[in-house]
Image: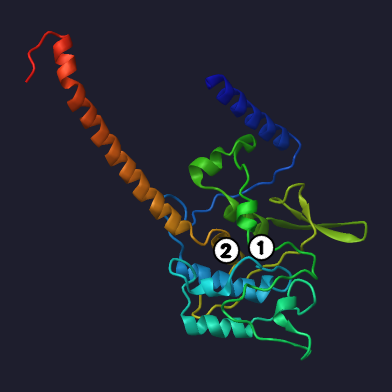
């Protein structure tokens, strides 16, 4: 068993080192998000700002097809009132076509129907950009020394940090390959990405006024995308904490029970009188 664990660990370290040596991984910053750790929670105001950034900037190219709009009112998440969720669903714009959003299009009337809270966020396929629903989970790679994942294990570095690092990692250098403009990015694997810098200082205005420089905007949208990928994170952590407490209590009770049951046997073995 120990030999198998040793071989598995060596294989993981070897693969991580090989990927690092090949220059496949970029630099990922460690950000102290509020949801990290066993007792972390989502910052509701930050999630609301992230929703605004997604709506104003990201939604033109990226969809959230796995996220129901009604979850915007769930406790522990964005926390919008029900009337605001209905208003948001009604005002969301999307490209109506016979593909991803065909269920939202009334072809007889020739127009798109309004979204309902029971609908998911629209998919966006015409831009050729990836859907962001699970991006924070998909990019929760092995960050840290030689791609070992130690930074992710001990510092909580995951997909949200990658998204933040990607949005803030543009150097300003560009090059053209096969008619496509590529942008140098210190976080993207390989160092060059086809997506132009989506955020900049002051790109989104918040009400009430909040810091809207590149770094704060990147933190807000990264936290929001973490919530889209893990909307039940807080409930899962709470259930896990209760389970650990229960198992700890059960362990103590079993230990005391074991001592009580075997105490007469041990005393008899030592030649001591039974109580």
Image height of 205 relative to 165, above or below = below
Residue in view at x 25 percent, y 30 percent:
255
Quarter of the picture holding the C terminus: top left
Query: Residue 74, how many percent across, how many down?
Result: 47, 70
Query: 190 or 99, which is in the foreground?
Result: 99
Q: Secondary structure at mark 2?
A: helix
Residue in view at x 36 percent, y 47 percent:
243
Query: Residue 59, how many percent across, how many down?
Result: 68, 72
Image height of 85 relative to 262, above or below = below
Tell me if 275 is positioned left or right of 142 in this view: left
Query: Residue 224, how many percent across, how many down?
Result: 56, 65
Regarding residue 32, the answer to whether it shows in the image is yes
Specify which label sits upstream in the sequence, 1 or 2. Answer: 1
The numbered disc on residue 228 is 2
Q: How is the image coloured?
A: rainbow
Q: Distance of mark 1 from mark 2, alpha carbons?
A: 8 Å
The numbered disc on residue 132 is 1
Task: Evaluate if marks 1 and 2 touch, with contact meaning CB atoms under 8 Å apart.
Answer: yes
Quarter of the image where one finds residue 216: bottom right
Image height of 19 relative to 26, above or below = above
Tell me if 97 is positioned left or right of 118 in this view: right
């Amino acid at each position: 068993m120990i030999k198998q664990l040793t071989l598995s660990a060596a294989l993981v370290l070897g693969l991580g080192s090989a990927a690092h040596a090949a220059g496949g991984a970029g630099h990922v910053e460690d950000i102290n998000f509020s949801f990290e750790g066993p007792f972390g929670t989502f910052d509701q105001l930050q999630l609301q700002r992230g929703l605004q950034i997604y709506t104003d900037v990201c939604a033109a190219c990226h969809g959230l097809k796995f996220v129901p709009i009604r979850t915007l009112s769930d406790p522990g998440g964005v926390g919008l009132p029900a009337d605001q969720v209905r208003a948001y669903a009604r005002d969301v714009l999307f490209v109506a076509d016979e593909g991803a959003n065909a269920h939202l299009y009334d072809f007889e009337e020739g127009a798109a129907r309004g979204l309902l809270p029971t609908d998911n966020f629209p998919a966006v396929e015409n831009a050729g950009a990836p859907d962001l629903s699970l991006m924070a989970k998909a990019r929760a790679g092995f960050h840290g020394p030689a791609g070992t994942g130690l930074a992710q294990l001990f510092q909580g570095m995951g997909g949200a940090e990658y998204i933040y690092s990607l949005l803030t990692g543009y150097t300003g250098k560009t090059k053209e390959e096969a008619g496509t403009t590529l942008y140098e990015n210190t976080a993207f694997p390989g160092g060059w990405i086809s997506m132009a810098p989506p955020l900049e200082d002051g790109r989104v205005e918040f009400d009430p006024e909040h810091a809207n420089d590149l770094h704060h905007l990147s933190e807000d949208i990264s936290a929001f995308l973490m919530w889209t990928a893990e909307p039940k994170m807080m409930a899962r952590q709470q259930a896990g904490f209760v389970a650990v407490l229960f198992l700890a209590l059960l362990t103590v009770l079993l230990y005391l029970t074991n001592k009580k049951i075997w105490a007469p046997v041990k005393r008899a073995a030592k030649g001591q009188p039974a109580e």
